[in-house]
Amino acid sequence: MNTPPVLFRLFADETLYANIATGLGAEHGRIEHRRFPDGEAYVRILSDCAGRDVVVLCGLDHPDAKLMTLILAAETLAELGAARLTLIAPYFPYLRQDQRFNAGEAVSARHFGALIARYFDALITVDPHLHRIHDLASVCPITCEVVPAAPAIAAWIKATVTRPLIVGPDAESEQWVAAVAGLASAPYVVGEKIRRGDRDVTVSLADTACVTGRTPVLIDDIISTGRTMAGVVELLTGPDRPLPVCVGVHALFDDETLALLQRAGAGELVSCNTITHSTNAIDLADSIVAGVVASRSSTTR
Ligand code: R5P
């Protein structure tokens, strides 16, 4: 019988961790981590990992506050003899800065990916924001397994929304929107977005009449400032129209943004549990477990 992996949790949702551990038949890894009074990170691995297949589930929203702990854990696990180190980062950050838009800018996607590849043998993540980069392994050169949220989102829509019309804010979103629409057997439309600044976004839709008789379900991979989602909501609200349902894969937003979206006219607002958030309604534990299993059959180094 194969020895089960040891699964550690860093900054990730407890329930998601427990469900992934059950799905993988993993041993719960014991780890202590905290901050010294001066803010520096402290990590101690308490489980025996020598020769073991080790998996770390790490929440990586607001990554700068978590990265040093993750690196100390990975270095220590390797020193203690872990045979293979896999990172499950349900949200993989820093991908939106995927090119040098202005002279002198850091291409964060490349540098962050390379950093993670230095410490791990494999990465499992959910719907990474791949726009100009087509393959995650081109910035993070290890075994990369991309877990799609579309099947779970489509199942949620089928169970919850009557006569949905799936709406994406921009061409970038079409990859997710088309997949969800196909699986939910629903039509879809995609808008056009112009971003002038972090909080200055305009979205347009060629034809808003297509919503007639349907409940719009707006889908985006990331909701951060909420300006993109709010722009679409405003286009689709009106008398006698059902309130738009909003679905984000990665909920990076705070309560102020939630209020902004509600003021704009959003109805139900839900997210996947890649980031612990009050709007979490779509569980991806089984999809992530399938991703880990698939990553074991791929090898790149
Ligand atoms: C864009 O590139 C992404 O797919 C999202 O549309 C974007 O990150 C949403 O950001 P915000 O909520 O700040 O408008």
Image (spheres, grey):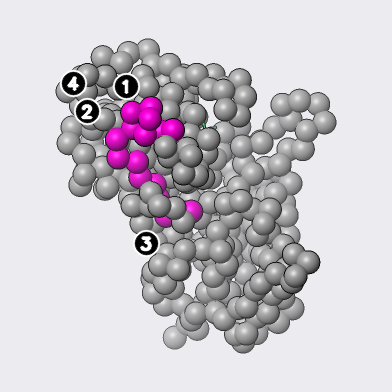
Q: Cβ–Cβ below 8 Å for labels 4 and 3? A: no
Which residue is the site of mark 1? 236
Residue at image point 66% right, 36% down: 97
Instruction: Quote the CA–CA distance across marks 4 and 3.
Output: 38 Å
Q: Which comes sooner in the sequence, label 3 or label 2?
A: 2
Which residue is the site of mark 4? 240
Q: Which comes sooner in the sequence, label 3 or label 1?
A: 1
Q: Is residue 46 above or below residue 195?
A: below
* Label 1 element class: helix
Nearer the observer, 24 or 234 = 234
Mark 2: amino acid: Pro
167 falls in the magenta region: no
Residue stretch rendered in magenta on the structure = 260-275
Q: Which comes sooner in the sequence, label 4 or label 3?
A: 4
* Label 2 element class: loop
* Label 4 element class: loop
Q: Which circle marks residue 242 in the picture? A: 2
Which residue is the site of mark 3? 286
Residue at image point 52% right, 74% down: 7
- Residue 245 location, quadrant: top left
